[in-house]
């Protein structure tokens, strides 16, 4: 059996376990709730914010995407990683898994693949939610809204935010697997997200650190008029690969998790 076959088997096993956990609900409910809240926020202002975007309800969502990228997405990834690892931690199954006739690295890679997939699902749900929210705003304010649906632009922004979150995902998966306590990855994720949000108004205060900080990168990409987006995405992807390799080696060499 090839290494790819081993990986397919472990990913399939993880998918089965994921269906029996709250992971799917977290990945779907959180982004859809954000879309609903943003729609209600624009509605409560009586269409004033939509007017400021040339009457385009979908364009009015773009500045609010920073809220998703800087706070909700990091917290969502944190919870997804913690829940994915807690399946084995709570049942003390890591030692059993590492004793199976499959490479240890494939078990770690499967966890990473599942969390990345769920994060992509969250971004897709948010995208659909924003499109539906724009249609609702168009119906609520027909005298104001007349801009075209910018589905492609919203998808591009959310795709970049998702790629920028890969480093955060790699870090949180490593932490979640490394510590058996469910509260440890949650605590680190919350502290990192809140600390990054505190510097959101003046990211230059962080200096070069904002370009490598896992919790800052999604917000950096989402900022309107953000510079060096391409370089930021390259850094996020390359560092995520490095962290994943180091985390895999460190975790799979341990006898007890």
Image (cartoon, helix red, strand yellow):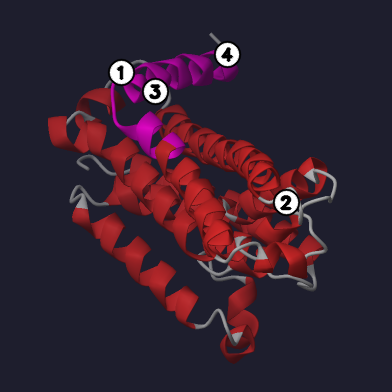
Count of picture labels: 4
Q: Could you tell me which secondary element the residue under label 3 belongs to?
A: helix
Q: Which mark is residue 238?
A: none
Q: Secondary structure at mark 2?
A: loop
Kindly identify which residue carries mark 4. Answer: 2
Secondary structure character of the magenta stretch overall: helix
Which numbered disc, 2 or 4, marks the residue that appears first in the sequence? 4
Q: Which residues are magenta?
A: 2-28
Q: Tell me the CA gap for discs 1 and 2.
A: 50 Å
The answer to whether residue 62 is seen in the rendering is no
- Relative height, residue 128 to residue 72 (above, below): above
Task: Identify the element where label 4 is drawn.
Answer: loop
**Residue 167 in view of the camera:** yes
For the C terminus, which image quadrant? top left
Label ID, residue 14:
3
* Mark 3 or mark 1, whichever is nearer to me: 3
Q: Is residue 28 above or below residue 102?
A: below
């Amino acid at each position: 059996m090839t290494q790819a076959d081993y990986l397919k088997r472990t990913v399939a096993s993880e998918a089965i376990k994921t269906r029996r956990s709250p992971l799917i609900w977290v990945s779907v409910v959180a982004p859809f709730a954000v879309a609903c809240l943003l729609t209600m926020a624009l509605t409560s202002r009586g269409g004033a914010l939509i007017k400021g975007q040339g009457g385009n309800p979908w364009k009015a969502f773009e500045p609010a995407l920073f809220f998703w990228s800087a706070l909700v997405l990091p917290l969502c990834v944190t919870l997804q990683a913690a829940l994915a690892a807690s399946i084995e931690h709570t049942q003390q199954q890591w030692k059993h898994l590492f004793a199976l006739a499959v490479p240890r690295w494939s078990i770690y890679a499967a966890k990473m693949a599942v969390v990345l997939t769920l994060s992509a699902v969250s971004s897709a749900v948010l995208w659909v939610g924003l499109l539906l929210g724009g249609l609702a705003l168009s119906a609520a304010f027909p005298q104001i809204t007349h801009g075209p649906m910018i589905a492609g632009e919203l998808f591009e922004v959310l795709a970049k935010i998702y790629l920028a979150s890969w480093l955060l995902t790699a870090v949180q998966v490593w932490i979640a697997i490394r510590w058996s306590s469910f509260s440890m990855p949650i605590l680190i994720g919350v502290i990192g997200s809140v600390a990054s949000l505190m510097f959101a108004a003046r990211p230059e205060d962080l200096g070069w650190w904002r370009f490598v900080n896992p919790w800052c990168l999604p917000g950096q990409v989402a900022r309107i008029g953000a510079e060096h987006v391409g370089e930021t995405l390259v850094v996020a992807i390359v560092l995520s690969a490095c962290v994943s390799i180091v985390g895999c080696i460190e975790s799979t060499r341990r006898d007890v998790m």
